Amino acid sequence: METSRETGKLNGSNKLTTQYCLPSERLLEGKLQFGDSNPGSQLEELPSWFNLELARKGQKFARERLYGVFYAHLIALFYLLAQRDARKILYYTQKSHTPELALKRYLATLLQVKLWYDSDISDDLSCPFFTSLSTVRKIHHGMGQRVQAQHPDFSKPVIEEPTEDDEDSSQPRGKLWEAFKADLESSDLAQDILPLEENPSGFYYFSQYDMTSTQWSFVALPIMYSQKLGMYDVTDEELEGFVHLWAIISHTLGLEPHYNICLVPDLESFKAHANWIYENQYLPGFFDVNYESEVMWCALAEGVSHIFPFLNVENLLLQTLEDFIVAPSQNFRRKIGWITVYRRLFQKAIVEPLLNFKWFQQYCNNYVRETIAKVTESRMGLNSSNDVEISQRAYYY
Ligand code: HEM
């Protein structure tokens, strides 16, 4: 007899699951709980809400829209680096503050994420999909311990901000940031940063809320801004699949159901959570940007320009201001170079309209795939399509 697991409908429907996630305002309670309640461990059994068919739809969506989905991950990383807690941990682990380091770190992350989209998910917990997640869970566990040992005092900066006299061309350019901040100030964005409770334990751990917030950074933008990311004619069914896939990924990494914004009954509920986090945490976070964020933004933009060649930090900031935050940009535009203006025009007038066509989307998907394959081979000596090897590989350890 065919079991419900074989049909991939463990929750008995082809829709999202029932409501497990707390109301948005209560997500902050997760700030006081460990990000992984059972650190470094493996998933022992699939949750009752696991829906194979829906998860596979999510994978198919991500593969068919790979360019847009990866671009969304990049923009979201830009948002993430403005966030105090996230940038601190990434900064303190000291592996993304130069372009070369940033390229390797983000490529390593991209390889695992690509595997979660490419490698067929099954209910066998030893398949590469789940092996990769278990590898990442172990990386997270080791990371907390190392950071604690190396930096017992999180209030001390790792790199001192240079004075005006030492400013060199590889460092963030002061006037650019001043203009970016001036434009933000003149927008009508709320500036109040969430009153995130300080971790009272005295030692470093990442919390359930940090997990929720990082989950947001992977899953929210393709849903909130599919058109702006060049993903046209997206159906609710595709997006529900993507949300469900991320419910599984986050669960397997140790996110508890109460804080999993993907464990909701429908797309509207997901969007409500995503908007709440966006408006209360991510957007106000831009007013808290400091030298660490600037260093890491520059490194990110230059590092990933090996994968998205038209990128530079001016471009990323301009696009974030104009297309996503939707704030005025007149101060910033006065400080950027002609290459950025030209690239922006090219993106708006040529790339975005062309993305309406399936053949061009396909071209961009193939381009990104081939570039990732080449860079992975040259920088890491790995075959990016070898799921078994990638899934077991913790790049840094
Ligand atoms: C849904 C949530 C999350 C996902 C999907 C995720 C994904 C990943 C992936 C794929 C890697 C592996 C990169 C490699 O192979 O080197 C990674 C590493 C890492 N993650 Fe996460 N992560 C999540 C949550 C978090 C949180 C909450 C933090 C901390 C606040 C965090 C901090 C790190 C750090 C520091 C590393 C890299 C270690 C290093 O390079 O030193 N992650 N994560």
Image (tube, helix red, strand yellow):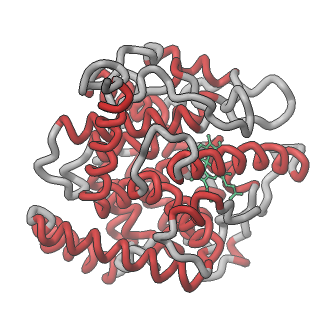
Q: Nearer the viewer, residue 82 or 365?
A: 365
Left or right: residue 336 compared with residue 100: left
Q: Nearer the viewer, residue 320 or 370?
A: 370
> Looking at this rendering, what residue extends furthest in the bottom direction?
378
Residue 327, how many percent across, how many down?
A: 31, 48
Does the rendering let one see residue 272?
no
Residue 196, how many percent across, how many down?
A: 62, 26
Left or right: residue 148 compared with residue 363: right
Quarter of the rendering occupied by the C terminus: bottom right
Q: Nearer the viewer, residue 232 or 372?
A: 372
Left or right: residue 309 compared with residue 342: right
Q: Nearer the viewer, residue 339 or 223?
A: 223
Report the residue at 44% width, 74% height from top: 372
Q: Is residue 262 above or below residue 231?
A: above
Does the rendering let one see residue 248?
yes
Report the residue at 50% width, 24% height from top: 47
Residue 331, how many percent across, how many down?
A: 36, 61
> Looking at this rendering, what residue extends furthest in the front direction?
1
